[in-house]
Image (cartoon, helix red, strand yellow):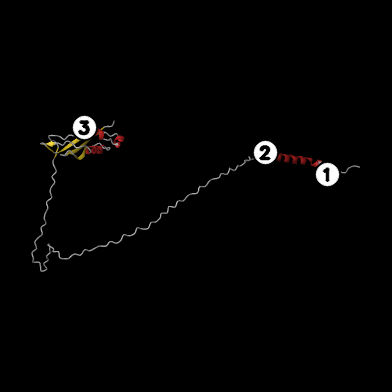
Amino acid sequence: MEAKKSPKANLEDKRTIFIEIGLIIALAVVLLAFEWKKYDIEVAQLGAREAIEQVEEIIINTKQEVKPPPPKPPPTTTVLNIVEDDVEIEDELIIDVEADEALEIEEYIPIEVEEEEVVEEEIFLVVENQPEFPGGEAARLKYLSENIEYPQMAKESGIQGIVYVTFVVEPNGSISNVAILRGIGGGCDEEAVRVVQNMPSWKPGKQRGRPVRVRFNMPIKFTLQ
């Protein structure tokens, strides 16, 4: 008995189509494999919990107690001392109620008080005996070198030179009327005046045997070392 086969069940005619479909699927799988991305997996670790000790703030009560006001002092009592009104007044004011315009009134003349004129003693420029620093010229130079402080401003600016100071030696040897004849600035002028004003009393100058006021000029040299 021969087997009967339907022409529709014959797969030989569809072989080519199945091969093409298989190639397409294989090609698609290959392309998908090339395009596939692999992501790195990172393991996130949570930090260990730390216990933080919270310090409570201590609030200090700064409220000041209001002190009651001090008690008021007791009122003072004024005691009036009443005396008898029998004291005679020597200087009485006489008022003439019957005086008219024809009455002659003596003109009041104020008493003039003469002011005494203060006569300043003469200041000599040249005298017979010139004033002298106690101990002589060497002592004067030593005093200046030991007491003069070079001003900082003059040091920084490089200022140096001679300051000429003038002053008056009084009859008692004291120093007055200190002034600058020619200065160099930078604080040197003020320092020269300060040192001269602090000098000890001089031996006064004399004219005809008596002490007189004498003007003296002194150069003070400022030199940077």
40 lies above or below 64? above
Disc assigned to residue 34: 2
Disc 1 secondary structure class: helix
Instruction: Verify CB contact (< 8 Å) between mark 1 and mark 3.
Output: no
Q: Work out whether mark 2 precedes mark 1 in sequence or the reverse, and give the earlier one.
A: 1
Instruction: Verify CB contact (< 8 Å) between mark 2 and mark 3.
Output: no
Gap between marks 1 and 3 measured at Cα:
149 Å
At label 2, the amino acid type is Phe
Instruction: Verify CB contact (< 8 Å) between mark 2 and mark 1.
Output: no
Taking the view exactly as shown, the residue that stands out farthest to the right is 1
Disc 2: CA contacts within 10 A as few (<14), some (14-19) or many (>=20): few
Left or right: residue 93 compared with residue 19: left
Q: Which residue is denoted by mark 1 in the rendering?
A: 9
Residue at the image point whose x is 83% and y is 44% from the top: 9
At label 1, the amino acid type is Ala
In this rendering, which labeled residue sits more in front, label 1 or label 3?
A: 3
x, y percentage for residue 194?
24, 39
Disc 3: CA contacts within 10 A as few (<14), some (14-19) or many (>=20): few
Disc 3 secondary structure class: helix
Left or right: residue 10 compared with residue 40: right
The answer to whether residue 221 of the structure is visible from this angle is no
x, y percentage for residue 2?
90, 42
Gap between marks 2 and 1 measured at Cα:
39 Å
Disc assigned to residue 139: 3
x, y percentage for residue 59?
46, 51
At label 3, the amino acid type is Ala
Number of numbered labels in the structure image: 3
In this rendering, which labeled residue sits more in front, label 2 or label 1?
A: 2
x, y percentage for residue 124?
14, 38
